[in-house]
Amino acid sequence: MKVAVLGAGAIGAYVGAALHRAGAEVHLIARGPHLAAMRQHGVRVRSPRGDFTAHPHATDDPAEVGPADHVFLGLKANAYAACGPLIAPLLHETTSVVAAQNGIPWWYFHRHGGPYDGHRVESVDPHGAVSAVLAPERAIGCVVYAATELEQPGVVRHLEGTRFSIGEPDRSRSARCLAFSEAMQAGGLKCPVEPDLRSDIWVKLLGNISFNPISALARATMRQMCLHGGTRKVIEIMMAETLSVAQALGCEVGVSIERRLAGAERVGDHRTSTLQDLERGKPLELDVLLAAVVELAEITGVEVPTLRTVHAISDLLALRSAA
């Protein structure tokens, strides 16, 4: 199996190192000091499950890699529309794109069935710009339950979790999903093929839609947000509104708000990816997390006043931080 990792940051490099350790042909596509460090020393993983180093090929030129069986997409979702020149050399007729993104994916309604089948979510696929680059037919959904940080160039700190749930938009157990799952498991990762990945998307989104923008607005860690009474209440309301939107789309989320909050509190003083991006001056990935659900609330007629309020304030923060 040949796998190209486009956007080999903390998660991408971690997955690439695990796949390479299991014998897959892996190519990491990155840039800057991180790329230089991986070329010289390999990917050094620091993990409570055991440290290891892998030496997959690393480059900044996708043309050097050529077509792959799978492209693991480790880019932020707000970079998808502009990634065409990078991903084009990696594709052949049957190449799949395993999109490891948070929030509502651009392919969400592809082969969804029902009244919204084929609907385009403007917040995540503006004017079809993402679909033009990443054909929904190529997409294998991926929900990441692993937490990693780039400790320094070439060094990935694995904090917890090894689960990468994947699934087809049409809910089938395809040969390509099963093959990718087997390769991931051979590398020591959990990679179940879910019959309906959309449920996993909403479970993960319950946390991202609330903790991520609030963490950036309050400059707070997971534990701090959970322990502050007022913030905890706002997060509970945001989660409840999100569940209402999921249910209106026919998706039952098999986790309670209290259980989701308890899990977040156990993470401790972890800074969300949105807070980390804010601190580093990077664009905030809020469209797929928050704006998309507000948009879905509009088409389903669900009232989400708290989501709208937090979206308005965090959107201003995103605009000001990008200025």
Image (cartoon, helix red, strand yellow):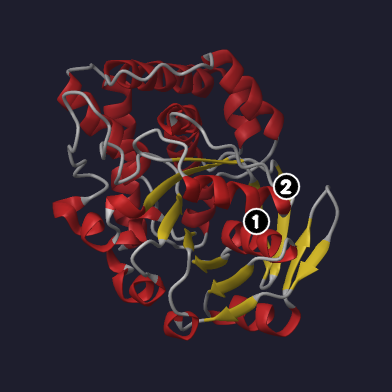
* Foreground of the two, 51 or 238: 51
> Would residue 31 be seen by someone viewing this image from the given angle?
yes
Residue that protrudes farthest toward the front in the picture? 175
Callout 2–callout 1 Cβ contact below 8 Å: yes
Quadrant of res 96 = bottom left
Q: Quadrant of the C terminus?
A: bottom left
- Quadrant occupied by the N terminus: bottom right
Type of amino acid at the residue the image marks with label 1: Glu
Q: Is residue 177 above or below residue 37?
A: above
Give the residue displayed 53% in from the left and 21% down from the top.
Answer: 232
Closer to the camera in the image, 317 or 210: 210
According to the picture, the residue beneath numbered tag 2 turns out to be: 159
CA neighbours of label 1 inside 10 A, class few (<14), some (14 to 19), many (20+): some
Quick check: 255 above or below 93? above
In terms of secondary structure, where does tag 2 sit?
strand
- Secondary structure of residue under mark 1: strand
Residue under label 1, please give it.
149
Identified at 40% across, 62% down, the residue is 95
Q: Nearer the viewer, residue 165 or 238?
A: 165
Looking at the rendered structure, the number of numbered marks drawn on it comes to 2
Position of 122 relative to 282 (above/below): above
Of mark 2 and mark 1, the one earlier in the sequence is 1
Q: Label 2 amino acid?
A: Leu
Q: Is residue 230 left or right of residue 288?
A: right
- Residue closest to the eye, 81 or 119: 119
Q: Residue at x 18, y 29 (%)?
A: 116
Q: Is residue 199 rendered to the left or right of residue 224? A: left
